[in-house]
Image: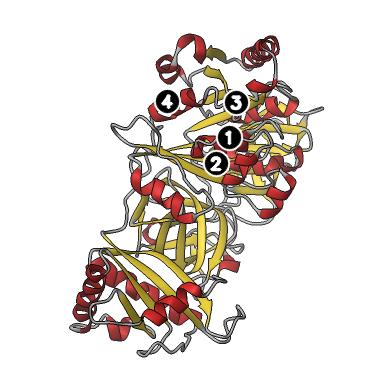
Amino acid sequence: MSADRSALRRAIERGERDGGAIEFKERLTREVHLADGRMESLVAQLRHRVLSGDGEATYVVGVTDDGGIAGIAPDAFSETMDVLSLLAEEADTHIADVETWSAGDGGDGDDAGLVGLATLREGGMFEADNDHIVVGTAGHVDHGKSTLVGTLVTGRADDGQGGTRGFLDVQPHEIDRGLSADLSYAVYGFSDGIDEPVRMDNPHRKSDRARIVEEADRLVSFVDTVGHEPWLRTTIRGLVGQKLDYGLLVVAADDGPTETTREHLGILLATELPTIVAVTKADAVTDERLAAVEREIESMLRDAGQTPLLVERHGIDTAVAEVGDGVVPLLRTSAVTKEGLDALDRLFASLPKRATPEREAFRMYVDRSYKVTGVGAVASGTVTSGTVETGDELLLGPMADGSFRDVEVRSIEMHYHRVDKATAGRIVGIALKGVDEAEIERGMALVPRESDPEPVREFEAEAMVLNHPTRIREGYEPVVHVETVSEAAVFTPEDGRLLPGDTGQTTVRFKFRPYLIEEGQRFVFREGSSKGVGTVTGIGPRSEGGTGPARAGDDD
């Protein structure tokens, strides 16, 4: 909810005028304002306001015809935005931004109702490109992941103190401590025929991120993970739970590869993610030290069965052609001097989008959720397959009891830009009707209603033990990471045990609740210093309660 009410005051003071771009509405309802005759009149009114404002209009919602603040309940505000969105679509416009305030004299409670400003702009909602790549970063804490990404997306040189890391989507306490404690996101892009990338001018403005999405012909999104060992679970979630195209592993020149570096490399390779290694802080060491660190990284890659490819020696075109399939490009960078950033730009501008799954139906695993006043519950994640559009009827779940909830897509946003639809590989926030934000949990999935999903509590898998002090026996209980699911599970190896380095069959059963799991999904499991990877080979007994998906509210 916006704190500064000056924009609201200015809109009300300007008022409605026949030739103006401002319209006052107390509320809009489907029953009244979408009825035959009334809808056509409102669409014509909306077009008039947008034309009067040279392509932009402002709707003040929750006020009377004379500009008096009335305030409407949150549910009524949400319905008003839904109706306004439908009117905008008919008028070939779109809602670009919504700000809300309490109708009372200051507080942010809902008792007094809501009043808001909706900005509408000419043209339909933006449809993103099909060549959008998503890159996941990894590496040890303080090795400069966030700083490198912040410099890439803005083009600004770092101050030597990690200042550009604040340009990512991070929490205030992370900025204060200089450590990332959760996944953060950033975006920049490229336009056909323009040598310079499309970067952010003011990364602290949501509208600037939206501008990148609108202007660029090709987008590059970053999922910046966590380098601190206590948050390994979050790092695994970022590398396994997102629909990534490439991994970017950073190694600081003043520190070299660490045990965490090797662990993150193992996760990237285990999930079969084509990986690039950037040596950061090249400005902070001598040429001799830089060469020594490169040799350490090359040795680390060869130990992992990979072939290092020095970009400086072999060139960008070779790196693009060879990355993946056992080849890992390696290049030097500095966020302070911007050394190597041109090479990274050219690399990201040229890397192909990885193939999407054969499944045509929409699916998205929820990574996080939040509530937006006037919009409602929002589920955020990466679309793993298919396409989702505003108005689609979906299922959310499974819930703890194995049921699925009927929901409807209110709107879709990508990097703060509202889009009309999203396809596989997009990182999006989907506003949902029919569910409270408190009911949405990480690891749940959104799927079409007609897909008839079944909750899975137990599955068969081929597992490989990467590291374990002894042997894995029946009853072993690691945390399993599959898509955005992070859940304790019980292993029952087929032959009674699995040794380090072994690959074998095992039954995996989630301890507490079911999830949406399917054959072919890759997963990582860990428990203390023990780690391994696996592939789902078969779905075992379904969760208790029948063979079909139950829906919340269905009769027993």
Tell me which numbered mark, 4 or 2, is placed earlier along the sequence: 2
Mark 3–mark 2 CB contact (< 8 Å): no
Q: What residue sits 76% from the left and 41% below the top?
A: 230
Q: CA distance from mark 3 to mark 2?
A: 20 Å
Looking at the rendered image, the disc whose residue lies closer to the viewer, 4 or 3, is: 3
**Which residue extends farthest right?**
469
For the residue labelled by badge 3, is the local secondary structure a helix, a strand or a loop? loop
The colour scheme is: secondary structure
* Residue marked by disc 3: 334
Visible residue check, residue 28: no
> Which mark is first along the chain, 1 or 2?
1
Q: CA distance from mark 4 to mark 3?
A: 16 Å
**Residue position marked by numbered label 1 in the rendering:** 137
Location of residue 553 in the rendering, given as x and y in whole percent from the top left corner: 51, 75
Mark toward the viewer: 4 or 1 = 4
Q: Nearer the viewer, mark 3 or mark 2?
A: 3
Disc 2 and disc 1: Cα gap in Å? Answer: 6 Å
Looking at numbered disc 1 in the image, what kind of residue is underneath it?
Answer: Thr
Secondary structure at badge 1 equals: strand
First in sequence, mark 4 or 3: give its number.
Answer: 3
